[in-house]
Image: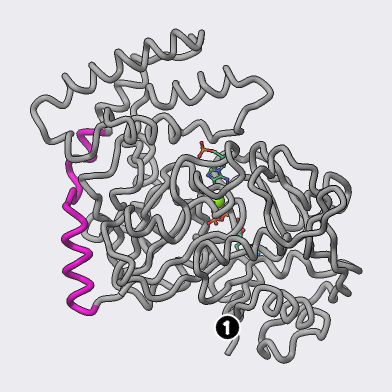
Amino acid sequence: MIDVILGLQWGDEGKGKIADYLTPKYDLVARFQGGPNAGHSLEFEGKKFVLNTIPSGIFRKTTLNLIGNGVVIDPVRLQEEIQRIVNECTDYKERLLISKKAHLIFPTHRILDAASENAKGDQKIGSTLRGIGPTYRDKIGRSGMRVGDILEVDFEKRYKKLVEQHLKQIEFLGFSDFDLKAEEEKFFAAIEFLKGHQLINSEYLIHKMISDGKKILAEGAQGSLLDVEFGTYPFVTSSNTLSGGVCSGLGVAPKHIRKVYGIFKAYCTRVGSGPFPTELDNELGESLRQKGNEFGATTGRTRRTGWLDLVSLKYTCMLNGVDELIMMKGDVLNGFDELQAATHYKIGETTTDEVPSNLCSTEVEPLYKAFKGWPTETSIDNGFDAMPDSFKDYIDFVQSYLGTKISVISMGPGRDETLVLN
Ligand code: GDP
Ligand code: IMO
Ligand code: MG
């Protein structure tokens, strides 16, 4: 049986915190897409960790963690990430499994990412420059290389052949700001390091676990509005971030998926370019950014901020088949006199509650419902019923608008700052 947790907005909803929080209920936590463009933050016992490729179950000693076939892996970044957690997780090697079918990010994929962004000028995606797009491009183009290939005798020969092609593309894009030799040294050292890990045919492991009645949590990366099919294309990432991606990203049939948990922030953020109808490019937005500490977990980039957009949230609940909602960062809205949430878009003379197919080229005016704010100090100690009425009104409206119940509300980054609703 597989449950899924994934982000319903543009990423950074707080997936890492919730995956870590839910992990004790599961035998395996698996990443099914994305790569080191993700930055998932976890806080416990006064410590803070940011994970990029490693699943967020790694800090719980009884849980296995799988980097699935749908993920793209940069060996250099993975090695750095492991070095950051190894003191906390001395036993990590026994609990970290890596699919042999996951594709490898080469140094030239990263350089190509930078070259492509550079060539796009003011149409830049705002990529994390981790090589994600070029690696998935090679995967779909059937020229990529996978983790299992590092064990083959002709690995270096095939590596060189692909790099030759990349260098031609980089030259064509007129990009020369890189030192490939230095990058390659780190890459091949990291390949040797990777060989010392459990590289497996993970689809067999998952199916064995399912038939043994074990519980699996699939941990999404990025967010539904960054999905390559249904996100704000072309300002998206290059993978299937929706619940459908779990099947191809882990090698499981839809019938094995039990529950989909959709995670959203009580407001909205976005990093990088692209449409953001409820964006607050003003003092209110700045106040959300400061209170919510909205700066990238790995890149440190400033996150754009805005009010909750229920129109797009309803869309992503539909696309993912969300069973239960988890609302994050409720505490960041503490102390506002008034809050707003968009319930409709006005496009020309038409009012709609649907996301247009071409959000990038459509002038959208969000229509808001206003809510009374709640006090600066809130305590979760006495449960949801004891929360301020205006807080409960906000939650009730969101649930009824989305037709889906909110089962958990996060009121701080720590494991214990979590309110579970009946
Ligand atoms: P992810 O990519 O979805 O895992 O999210 P990130 O880790 O990139 O960003 C979420 C940020 O919010 C992290 O710094 C978390 O520590 C923090 N965070 C998570 N939940 C809460 C919450 O309920 N309240 C506050 N104030 N911060 C939170
Ligand atoms: P987590 O898992 C927020 C955004 C980038 C850029 C676009 C494409 O931490 O939520 P890419 O590097 O994939 O080519 O970038 O997607 N992006 C994210 N934004 N959180 C993420 O991951 C993101 N991963 C990619 O900012 O706009
Ligand atoms: Mg993040």
Q: Residue at x 52, y 64 (%)?
A: 17
Give the quadrant of the N terminus: bottom left
Q: Residue furthest left?
A: 153
In depth, the one of 330 and 211 nearer the eye is 211
Vertical placement of residue 415 versus 347, above or below: below
Give SS at disc 1: strand
Q: Residue at x 34, y 64 (%)?
A: 29
In this image, 156 relative to 368: left or right? left
Residue 242 makes an appearance in the image: yes
What is the span of residues highlighted in magenta in the rendered image?
191-213
Give the quadrant of the C terminus: bottom right
Q: Residue furthest front?
A: 349
Q: Residue at x 48, y 9 (%)?
A: 176
Quadrant hosting residue 421: bottom right
Residue 62 makes an appearance in the image: no
Q: Which residue matches tag 1?
A: 420
Is 192 part of what is drawn in magenta?
yes
In depth, the one of 418 and 241 nearer the eye is 241
Dot 1 crowding, Cα within 10 Å, few <14, some 14–19, many 20+: some
Q: Position of residue 185 (x, y in %)?
A: 29, 21
